[in-house]
Amino acid sequence: MKLTELTNETEGASEGKWFEFTFSDGKTQQLRLASSASTEYQNFAANRWNAARRGRQTVPPPAMRRILCDGIIQYLLKDWKGDAITEDDGVTPLPFTEKNVRAVIEGRSLEAQALRDFIIEQTGNTLNYLKADGLNGTEEESASAADVIKSSPALASGVGQASTAPQGT
């Protein structure tokens, strides 16, 4: 693959792309996720990590969790749809509001941890947001572009993936 065929042009990096998360009960929720490679998120994360590390070798776990949750809530999770995340009645889909997002993302259950891990993993993979030249960004074309990327040894090995850790820390 020629260097000119790979561009830095992204699709959905700021506004988000849809991903499907499956809970342990088999129910799925659609999540619109923005890339953690966005300048806004990188600036937020760098500032918060640096502030939390001041005078320390490492960031204490409670501060680390708070930074991750705040980043997801403010920058990465843009919307959700589906019926896996519900009101207490177990039937009514929970509306996407800041209060509800905070309650779900800050949860201490294994499901909440798995959801946070999924969000961090998906938003940290820049290949999820690359737009191949000449494509219109449809799901079929994105799947085709993903096949091309997987067939490239350098790209399939993870070259070009973004880290979820902020740069310069």
Image: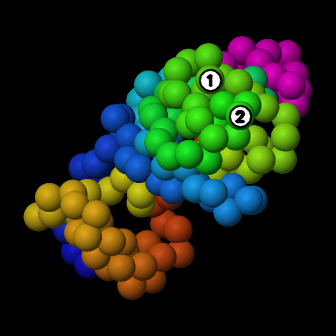
Horizontal placement of 83 versus 116: left or right? left
What stretch of residues is rendered in magenta? Answer: 44-64
Q: Which residue is mark 2?
A: 89
Quadrant of the rendered structure where residue 79 is? top left
Residue 107: x, y in percent? 78, 32
Horizontal placement of 107 versus 157: left or right? right
Give the alpha-carbon distance from disc 1 to disc 2, as whole Å.
15 Å
Q: Give above or below for 147 relative to 114.
A: below
Q: Give above or below for 108 relative to 100.
A: below
Figure label count = 2
Q: Is residue 52 magenta?
A: yes
Quadrant placement of the C terminus: top right
- Residue 128 visible within the image: yes
Q: Which residue is mark 1?
A: 100
Instruction: Give the SS element for disc 1.
Output: helix
Instruction: Give the SS element for disc 2.
Output: loop
Query: What residue lies at 66% left-to-right and 31% top-to-bottom?
Result: 87
Farthest residue, direction left? 134
| Mark 1 surroundings: few (<14), some (14-19) or many (≥20) residues within 10 A | some
